[in-house]
Image (cartoon, rainbow, N blue to C red):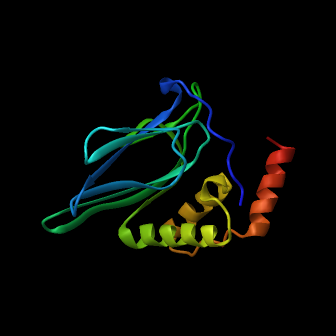
């Protein structure tokens, strides 16, 4: 399994902050994968996680009201370094390079199963090719199944990164 380099001490303004909320059966925001550089607990329902540039994470948001689910969403985000262009999204400051953005529980569930399959191959989802996450998003939006991310594809991605950083 490929591991990212250990996190170094980062100034607070160089980190991407993600607000996590957990109110039982009402609002649940969580990280599916990703290695946070720091965590601040605000109270028993809210935390902030901070991610260093290039440390990819998956952010899942689910909320419901008395009538049922009102939002199901997963975003896979690459935090950017200071000065890099970025996209904004709720509860993530300042934002990041959004590699995948999927809404609706049936599609979110497919992404979660896809992540499980990647982990079953022994691959850390944080280290997956950004192009693969874009591929997954595009295929799901088109109503097609995404290609499997195999160990051979992952090795090819790692080799490509060595050749052309």
Q: Residue at x 61, y 53 (%)?
A: 126
Q: Position of residue 18 (x, y in %)?
A: 41, 41
| Quadrant of the image occupied by residue 128 | bottom right
Q: Residue 73, percent across and down?
A: 39, 59
Q: Where does residue 11 sit, x and y in percent of width and height? A: 53, 24
- Labels in figure, total: 0
Q: Is residue 138 above or below residue 121?
A: above
Judged from this view, the residue extending furthest toward the right is 163
Relative side of 65 to 59, left or right: left
Identify which residue is drawn at 75% across, 61% down. Answer: 154
Examine the rendered structure and indicate whether residue 161 appears above or below residue 145: above
- Quarter of the picture containing the C terminus is top right
Q: Position of residue 79 (x, y in %)?
A: 55, 39
Residue lying at 30% horizontally and 57% vertically, measured from the top left: 28
Residue found 43% across the figure and 67% down from its top:
108
**Residue 53 vertical position relative to residue 33 in the rendered view, above or below:** above
Q: Quadrant of residue 63?
A: bottom left
């Amino acid at each position: 399994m490929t591991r990212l380099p250990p996190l170094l001490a980062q100034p607070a303004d160089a980190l991407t902050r993600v607000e996590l909320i957990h109110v039982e059966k009402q609002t649940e925001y969580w990280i599916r994968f990703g290695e946070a550089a720091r965590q601040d607990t605000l109270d028993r329902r809210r935390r902030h996680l901070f991610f260093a540039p290039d440390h990819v994470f998956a952010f899942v948001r689910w909320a419901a009201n008395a009538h049922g689910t009102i939002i199901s969403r997963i975003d896979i985000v690459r935090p950017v370094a200071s000065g890099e262009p970025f996209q904004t999204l709720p509860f993530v400051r300042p934002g990041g390079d959004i590699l995948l953005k999927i809404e609706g529980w049936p599609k979110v569930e497919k992404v979660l199963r896809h992540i499980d399959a990647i982990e079953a191959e022994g691959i850390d989802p944080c280290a997956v090719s950004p192009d693969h996450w874009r591929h997954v998003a595009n295929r799901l939006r088109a109503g097609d199944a995404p290609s499997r991310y195999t160990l051979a594809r992952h090795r090819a991605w790692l080799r490509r990164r060595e050749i052309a950083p």
